[in-house]
Amino acid sequence: MDGMWYLAVFLSAFAVDSIPLFAPPAWTAMVFLLVKFHLQPWIVLLAGVSGSTLGRYLMSLYIPRFAGLFIKRHKTDELKFLGKKLSENLWQSWLFVFVYSVTPLSTTALFTAAGAAKVKPSHIVPPFFGGKFVSDAVMIFAGFYAATNFQDLVHGSYSPKGIAALAFGCVVVGGFLFLDWRVFLERRKFRFNFKIWK
């Protein structure tokens, strides 16, 4: 029976990351299924990251033809920046894709640039898988501990460990969401942006 839910994790991550439209990050669905059905975190992580990787790769094959429908004009500079980074030698492009994939930045632009520049899958898929594995692991475990400890707090279990785990999970998620990752990647500077919602 659990196998069906792991397949659901894979398919939900694949669905979210195979379309360029705005959608919640795949890790949110992974955390939901993990908590709801009491799944094994590492298997959820492996299934989800595999689904995300396949979805993004397939998106890179078709999105360059339709980029004008999804990507705003002011994103042109970002695509040029990404295309330049992906055109570097293998290890430099791997390092960049890995670091970019660790951040919560949308990888739609990354795979659009890769598709438009006809970058070889070997230059982008392995480091993307590695980066997503790291970032989704952080978000899944932080979200899992925050969710489970929140449930304990709701049911009246006020242990210092539970409160600390909840606070830690919220800080990790907040840091990922509010750090201006584009500024960090382009200028190597830390800047936080708290205006992330319209």
Image (cartoon, rainbow, N blue to C red):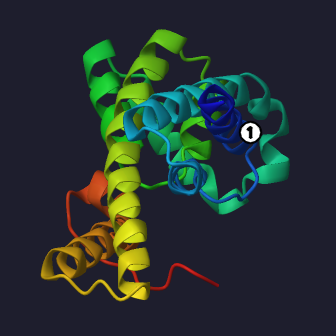
Seen at 25% across and 58% down, the residue is 187
Seen at 59% across and 44% down, the residue is 109
Outermost residue to the front: 156
As rendered, which of 132 and 170 lies closer to the eye? 170
Tell me the residue that label 1 is attached to. Answer: 15
Q: Residues within 10 Å of mark 1 (few under 14, many from 20)?
A: some
Q: Position of residue 124 (x, y in %)?
A: 46, 22
As rendered, which of 49 and 44 lies closer to the eye? 44
Name the quarter where the N terminus is drawn. top right
Quarter where residue 178 is shown: bottom left
Residue 154 visible at all = yes
Seen at 76% across and 53% down, the residue is 21
Residue 120 visible at all = no
Q: In this view, does 107 lie to the left or right of 19?
A: left
- Secondary structure at badge 1 equals helix
As rendered, which of 65 and 14 lies closer to the eye? 14
